[in-house]
Amino acid sequence: MTDTTAPVLELRGLRKSFGDQEVLRGIDLAVHRHEVICVIGASGSGKSTLLKTVNLLEGIDDGQVLLQGEDISDPRVDVDATRARIGVVFQQFNLFPHMSVLDNVTLASRKVHRASRPEAEAIARRLLDRIGLGEFAGAFPDRLSGGQQQRVAIVRAVASDPELLLLDEVTSALDPQLVGEVLDLVTELKQQGSTILMTTHEMHFARNVADRIVFLHRGEVVEQGTPAAVLDTPQHPALQAFLARVH
Ligand code: ADP
Ligand code: MG
């Protein structure tokens, strides 16, 4: 049952192992409406796995994933219908190379949400215009720079107005000069009220845009708080060491 007073996303005691390696070791986390949460942590700390469990790309071994109060980790849940409520963008290879930019953006709305083609295309063109890529609607993704492709991927993810947006290191594969335009789009989505759970190595961005930063260490949330608290007065030695490495 959807509960509009519940957090958009709530993780309770989430555990996940690959073989005998426990990658998520009891994660508790709530993401409230209009919040932007940045998950930081060393490579291998479990950030991507965490996002994948939310999107039901990875099953969990224990705990619960609640979307608007509904337990989506329940095996009886409709996986496709649930995924349609969540927008996702990964580090790379997000767009279908054999489809035009416009078709990429409208695909989910047409297939999953059963919008009519004219309806879906009108929304897609408006979104593409807003990010300055309207002229590329008919082009194939390989005509676009990496930064432009990621912006299209983000626009595609929000085209059907998802309840939650998951972004997994969406700028990590980009040349440094293309990072800003993608993060600016994320900032704009926050201003428009999107609810976002994202992983990033861009500490400057996290400081300026995140409502809360969550530090993951070996599959556990060992510290979280406002950007100032987490970045300026880190308490946990692992967080202190991590920040010394990335700054
Ligand atoms: P991060 O995104 O923080 O770098 P990941 O969630 O990708 O971390 O990985 C956490 C740990 O889980 C790593 O040790 C990784 O090798 C392991 N892992 C991730 N996915 C799989 C998988 N499908 N099978 C086996 N091990 C995996
Ligand atoms: Mg990762």
Image (tube, helix red, strand yellow):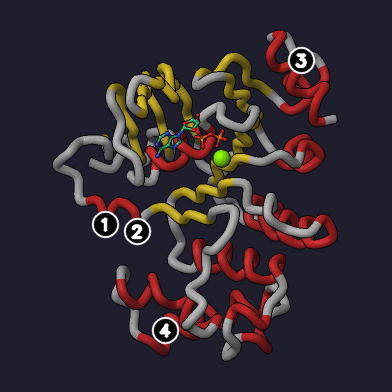
Q: Pointer 3 and pointer 4: residues touching (CB < 8 Å)?
A: no
> Can you say which quadrant of the picture contains the C terminus?
top right
Q: Which of the four quarters of the rendered structure image does ligand 2 lie in? A: top right
Q: Which mark is residue 84?
A: 2
Say whether residue 215 is left or right of residue 56: right
Q: Residues within 10 Å of mark 4 (few under 14, many from 20)?
A: few
Determine the residue positioned at 53% across, 56% down: 89
Mark 1–mark 2 CB contact (< 8 Å): yes
**Residue 235: image tag:** none
From the image, state whether disc 2 or disc 3 is nearer to you.
Answer: 3
Q: Which residue lies furthest to the left in this view?
A: 76
Structural crowding at the residue carrying mark 3, measured as other residues with C-alpha within 10 Å and reported as few (<14), some (14–19) or many (≥20): some
* Precedes in sequence: disc 4 or disc 2: 2
Q: Mark 4 points at which residue?
A: 119
Q: How far from the left and from the top, in percent, is residue 224?
A: 62, 20
Residue 240 is marked as 3
Disc 3 marks a residue whose amino acid type is: Gln
The residues bearing labels 4 and 2 have C-alpha atoms spaced at a distance of: 18 Å
Relative to 80, does residue 57 appear above or below in the rendering? above
Asked whether mark 2 and ligand 1 are closer than 8 Å, the reply comes as no
Query: Mark 1 and mark 3 in contact (Cβ < 8 Å)?
Result: no
